[in-house]
Amino acid sequence: MALMEIRVAPEWVDYNGHMNDAEYARVFSLGVEALMDAIGLDEAGRARYGYTLYTLETHLCYRREAHEGQPLSVEETVLARDAKRLHVFFTMHDREGMLLATSEQMLMGIDSDAGRPAPFPEAVAGVIETLPAAAEGDWPELAGRRIGLPARR
């Protein structure tokens, strides 16, 4: 099920005629905001709990081009979590279900007043438990990748 749906805006298209690489990051950032809304950390929830999420790390992989006006959907899978962190894998698809990009992210829960990491509020943690999650040792094939050149032999 899609976490969010959006269309490629004209201003996101670069001189190559497709969505600029930075705009893929924008879409996944909007995906994090949609995730926050879904777990009760929308604007009202952030104010109520004095709590937010920060992105600690992201690994974005480009699979296919996206073009102006093209509908996009973003889905998420929780790879792992603890009391204050979420390791999440986002996928971006076109209308036909073709994989366009992935973004693996580590998100940290933050006490907004203290500006420090803190455990998820109890209500938020309860919702996180209901999110789509990868089974132990059964991550999506493209998750957990590292960047690097093959070793020379």
Image (tube, grey):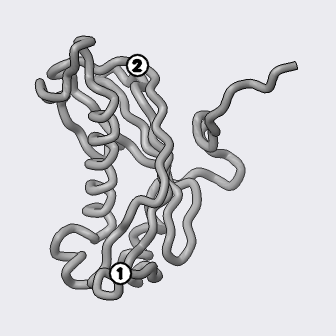
Q: Quadrant of the N terminus?
A: top left
- List x then y, in percent, for residue 63: 46, 23
Q: Which residue is mark 2?
A: 64
**Left or right of residue 37, residue 107 in this image:** right
Residue in view at x 48 percent, y 68 percent:
129
Residue drawn at x 49%, y 63% is: 86
The amino acid marked with disc number 1 is: Gly
Which is more toward the observer, 71 or 150? Answer: 150
- Say what secondary structure mark 2 lies in: loop
Left or right, residue 40 beside residue 133: left
Disc 1 on helix, strand or loop?
loop
Q: Is residue 75 left or right of residue 47?
A: right
Residue found at the very far top of the displayed protein: 16
Q: Nearer the viewer, residue 138 or 112?
A: 112
Q: Which residue is mark 1?
A: 115
Callout 2 crowding tier (Cα within 10 Å): few <14, some 14–19, many ≥20:
some
